[in-house]
Structures are given as C-alpha cells and as structure tokens.
Amino acid sequence: MYSRRNSVLALEPALPDGPHLPPGQAPTPLVGRETDIRELGARLTDPHIRLVTVTGPVGVGKSRLAAAVFDDVLSEFPDGGRFLSSPTDPQADPDALAQGVVHGVRDRRFLLALDHCEQIMDTLRQVLPGLLAACPRLTVLVAADEPLGVYGENLYRLGPLAVPESADDPARLRDVPAVRLFLERARAARPDFALTEDNAAAVAALCARTDGLPLAIELAAARMKLTSPQRLLAELEEDLGALSGGPGDCASRHHCMRAAIESRLARLEEEDAAFLRRLACFHGPFGLDSAVDLGGAPPARARRILERLVDRNLLQAQECPDGEIGFQMLGLIRRRLLEAIPPRERDRLMREHAEHFAGVVKAAQDGLSGAEQARWLDMLAQVHPDLMAALRLLTSTGENAEAVALTLALRRHWLINGRLRDGVHWLSEGLATGALPRHLGTGAQRLLGELLLWSGEHHEAHRRLTQARAAYREMQDDSGAAACERLLGLLACHRGELAEAGRLLEGAVRALRDAGTARGHALALRDLAECRRAQGRPEQARELAERALHVFLRQDDTRNVALTRCLLAHIAGDRGEGEEAERLYRQSLTRLCELGDLPACAAGLERYVLLLTARHGRMTESWRRAVRALAAADRLRTVVGCPSPQPAALDGTLAQARSRLGEEAFEEAWRAGRSAEPGDVVAETLAPLRGRRPARVRPADTPLTERELEVAELVARGLTNREIARRLGIAEWTVVNHLRKIMRKLDCCSRVQVASWMTRLLGEADPAA
C-alpha cells in the first residue's frame, strides 16, 4: 500500500511505484468535521463514484479534510493511493500526463488525491475524464476552490463550522464546533486560557465574526497569547488585518485572512467582481430577485454571474423552505469588499439597499395578515439584519419620517418574530426627534405603547397609549382611539385591574364595531373574552372568543385563529373539559410554532403545562415535560424580552415539579428544555401521555415504512434527532434522511406536523388510551 503526501512538480508516470510512506498524521485534531469525514469517506469508497471534488470558501479547511479522509479510507483501496499537493506544472502536456498515470495505475484499485489545484484546473478538466475511462478502478479526490465542471464529477461543498447563536449558557457554548476549535487553539497559545462568564459573549461573537472559518478562528485564537477576546473583537471592528499571524499559528498555507480573501477575489473577471461588490450591501441572506434588483445586471446575465460566484464559493447558496434558492455572503468577504469600495459609491449602494428593503416591507403587508403569514414572517426574519441597516441609514441621514413609517410597517415583525426590543428602540429614536407629521407620530406612540405592554413595562406603556388615544380623539380618528382603548383594556387586564379592563374593552368592542373595522372588532372581542375568563365567567368568555374566531377564519388570519383557539383551550380547561382543551392546544400551539411566534409559543406552553400537570400529575413524565416546557418558555421570553404575566402560578408548578422529580432530575430536565429547539419542546409537550405501551401501528395502515414509523413515533414523543439516533442505533444523518422522507410522504413541512399526525394515528390505533 502506498501513501505519499508531498509537493512534486509533475505526476510521476508510474504512481504506485513510489516509496511506501505511512498515512500522515496532522499535528492537531480536526475539530467539528466528524460528519464530513464520514460522508466524504462514504463517497470515496462507493465504487459508482469515481471523481469527488471538495470545494468551499477560502479558509474553510479543504486540505485538512481531504488529508484526513484520505488517511481514513486508504485501507479500502488494496492497491494503495497517493496524496499530492500542488501536483503539477500548469504548462505540463495533458496528454503526456494522462499517459503516464494510465501506465502506472491501469486496472488497479487506487486512490489519487490532488490538493491545491487552483493553477492546474484547465489541465485537470482535459486529463481526468479520459484518465477515469482508461483506469476503471481509479478513484480521484480533488480539493480546489471551485468545481471542475466535468461529467461524472461528484461535488462536496464543505461549509464553515457551526457558530453559536447566543452566549447565555457557557456550558452549552463549549459544544459548538467553532468554539471548540477556538478554545483548543487558544490554549495552545496560552495554556491557562479558559471560557468564563466574563469572556463567553466575546468568544461567541468572535466565532460568529470569523464566519466559522477554521483559518480565521485559528488566527484569532493565536492572538490570545497577548490579548483578550474582548480586545480582539474591538480591533476587528477597525481592521480585518487583526486576523493575521505566522506559520505556527494555523495549519493553512495562508497566514492572513485579508490576503487569503484577496487571492480569491483577484481571480474574478471584472464583470463578476463588480456584481459581487454591489451584493456586499446585503447584511444577511437574499433571494434571486433582490440580487437582480441590486446587482446592476439584466436578469439572465445576473443568473449566470451568480452561478459563477457560487461555484467559486464567494456566495453560499441554499434552498429555502418555499423552494426558492437563497444566497448569502460570508461576513469577512463582505467586509473586505466594502473596504475596497470608494465612500461615495458605498453611500449610493447603501441608499439603493434601503430603498429596496422599504419596497420589500411594503410588498409584505398584505401577506402578513392572510393565509401565507408564515412565509412572509419567515422572509422578514431572514432579512432582519438588512432591515436594521435600512433603518440605521434613514436615521443617520435625518430621514426620521421615513424611518418611523418603515418601523410602523414592521409591526407584526416586532411582535411575532420576537423583536420587541428592536421595535422599541427605533420607535423611541424616531419620536425623540419631535419633527414627525402628527398622524405618523401618533401611530408611533400607539405601537410603542403596544410593544412596551408586551415587554412588561406597564407604566410607560400606559403613558404612551394614553397620549396616543388623546391625539386620535383630537384628530377625530375614532378607530385609532378605539384601538388605543383596546390596548389600555388589555394592559389593565395584565395588571389585574379586571373591572377597569372590562369597562375599557366593552367600549372598544362597541367603537370598533361602529367604525366597521372587522379585524379590530374581533381583536377587542378576544381581549374581552380573556378579561371575562379572568373574572371567572367562562360561558361569556367562550361566546366572545367564538365570535372572534369566526371573523378570523373568514379573513384567513392564520395567527389570530391560532391565538383564539389557544384562548378557547384555556376556557375549556377552566370548564373541566380536559380532552377538548388538549385538542385545542394541539391545534393552536402547533400552528403558532410553525409561524415562529415566539412570545405566543412561550405563553401557550406555560398555560398548557398548568393543564398537563392538573390532569396527569400522577404520572412522573408529566412533571418532567412540564419542567422542560417551562425552561424552553423561560428561554424564549429571555430572548424576546417578554416577561410572563403569571409568574406566581408557574413558580408554584416548578416547586411541585422539583419535589416530585428530585433535585438532580429537575435540573437535568431544566437544562434540556433551555437548550432544546422550540419545535422539539412543543412536539414533546403535546405528545400523548400513556400509562401503558401504545398500540402498535402497522405499516400497511400508513404510507410509511416500519423504520419511518419508528422515527415518527419518537418525534411525537419529543425526542431530538440525536436522541432518536441513539435509541434506534443509527446515525444522526440517517434520522434526518428518514424525517425528510416522512415529511415528503405526509406532505408536512415541520416535525411538529409529523408529531401531530403520529399522535392522531396512535389515538386511532388505541382509542381507549
């Protein structure tokens, strides 16, 4: 067996006759690439795959991965293999090169790995198709910046390491691959370096700022010898050159992130480079239409340029939930491009960017109140960084009226996507100028009061809403004044001032009915139903809520249908109708989770837990689920900035759970809930509790296979992909593949829907359960 990893000027005519060398071992472990090693290794050992090209962004670690996989799979090739770095001269004769390799390999089962191939891509495009045809048992692995683009090529795009979403849990932070690599290399530079509560946020921000690129992470970690994460983060704000070092600081041939990026950009044609510079104005993901709108090229040409930029890994492309392809530029590449754009041109681009996203928000208005709410809300969540950039530009240039108008148009985004703090910030900024048209300033006061209400800042919310109501009355805007009256009534209800809440909400119901605003009238009906429920009048509460539900159903208002059904579930629970309450909770919480309505998910989980423990408190599992659900709700409320209106009841439930489970089990469940995805927690919490093993569902009764049924049942029980993999003894990526097939067969778009389907099926199979 032959393994050779060196730099040579040409591929020798007889590759297998070289000296025997053992597989090379890198001086440091390859962090966070376990799945990539497994998947790439599976492709190389598949006899039907003959040519695999590993590509990825600059600094992503293509060479390290190729070397690690080569060493890992070499034993599967009985005639050996060769790993060549910088393998040939770009001026070499392709025909002579191919003949030499054919002579050496012939019909041997041989693995040839070629690294750093940027200078010889044209040669490889000519050589490899004929070489693979002449050597039927040869497998070739190529590591390069872009695909070869030849027939039969199997492309493996290597992505950056996962970066942390937040730093609120240092223990959880250590498990994130980018952080693991940073800590390992930082300790190599400074052995006493440790992740602490003081530096956790800076470490998380550094890993995010490096885009999860191993080269950038290693260069940042090497700086820990003489600096801190906080100081380096501040330096990076000013100078991309802070990510540079020497040969001993990283495993890459590059020792400066700026130079590495520039080497990739330098190979672009001017048309592609100009288009890419214009796309640098995007702060987050963007779609094809946005790229065409801001890229400055006709649609057909823009598509061709985008294809080339994706091939060269200067843009990342991925399929969105709606089936469209989205694009994103890594932050470090974007930073370098913006540095190179003259200030006047950069200002013009940012102006066009702000105008574009103002148009996007305007186009979203109708969709945000109809049946496609989920799609539009998800789109706004995706472009949130660009919306913030547009607001910053408008504010910095003194266009306060335009900034406030855009902020008002984003009302549902602030409320539903959990961006209360951002909405409060921009409305406060706009109102502080004191130079707004009256109708705009009054609308800003009203929305600010609403956001403050849900943020738990009741005193300031009352002040803002009272001012807005007075202004609407002066302008003789009855519907505006009634909308403020409704919010003031809801605020009084949250404060426990139920008599005042009832008076205000009754007036709002009448005024909004008379004003002919069907949706506003329905909102007031639902809020009054909430008040009547709190007053202990469930019959009247149900009648009011059902009237509101009828309006929302007629308007196809998905979110408000779900919120109203959630209220009806609370009322059914109060009336002792436990089964009906659970049915309504399943309907409403599943839909709210799909919409991504974080505040409503938190509130729904909290209220469902009270029902769950009241009905099934004799079962230990109900208390474990309750703790996980309340932990998840607590984390959601922390992220959103939306405190619970019923802390006393929840504290009592948690105290009971701690007593029932014991300290250790309680803490374990709490940690699990804090770290779990909201959809997983909702699915687990809503899954049926059974005192005995559920009836067996046969594959013949469903479109699913036996294994798919097993996976679906475990999803319904609330297990994560990793937990399912452990339970069934299969790989986590196999679980993901099963889940994709299940969703396709059932026409589902989320694991919450899969859980609901399986729950119904289990209930049909075991009606007595």
Image: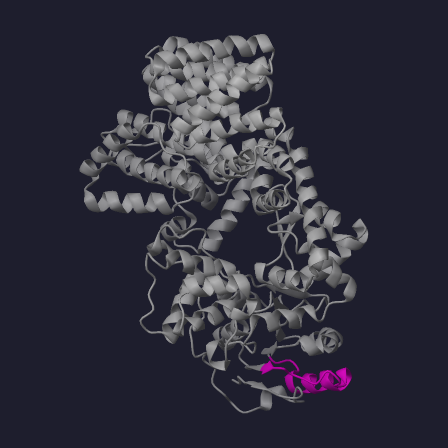
Q: Position of residue 5 (x, y in %)?
A: 54, 84
Q: Note whether residue 50 is visible.
A: no
Which residue sits at x=51%, y=89%?
Answer: 20
| Closer to us: 232 or 463 | 463
Which residue sits at x=56%, y=41%?
Answer: 381
| Closer to us: 139 or 309 | 309
State how the image is colored.
one colour
Which residue sits at x=37%, y=23%?
Answer: 494
Task: State how many labels appear.
Answer: 0
**Can you say whether 348 is above or below 181 in the image?**
above
Q: Residue furthest front?
A: 434
Q: Is residue 470 magenta?
A: no
Q: Position of residue 71 (x, y in %)?
A: 49, 76
Quarter of the view holding residue 583 = top left
Q: Position of residue 403 (x, y in %)?
A: 61, 38
- Image check: 135 left or right of 205? right
**Can you say whether 543 is above or below 617 in the image?**
above
**Can you say whether 611 is above or below 355 in the image?**
above
Which residue sits at x=37%, y=28%?
Answer: 766
Quarter of the view holding residue 390 = top right
- Image check: 10 left or right of 62? right
Q: Is residue 102 magenta?
A: yes
**What segment is highlighted magenta in the picture?**
84-108
Q: Quadrant of the C terminus?
A: top left
Q: Position of residue 535 (x, y in %)?
A: 33, 13
Quarter of the view holding residue 153 = bottom right
**Can you say whether 468 is above or below 312 in the image?**
above
| Closer to us: 656 or 297 | 297
Q: Note whether residue 599 is visible.
A: yes
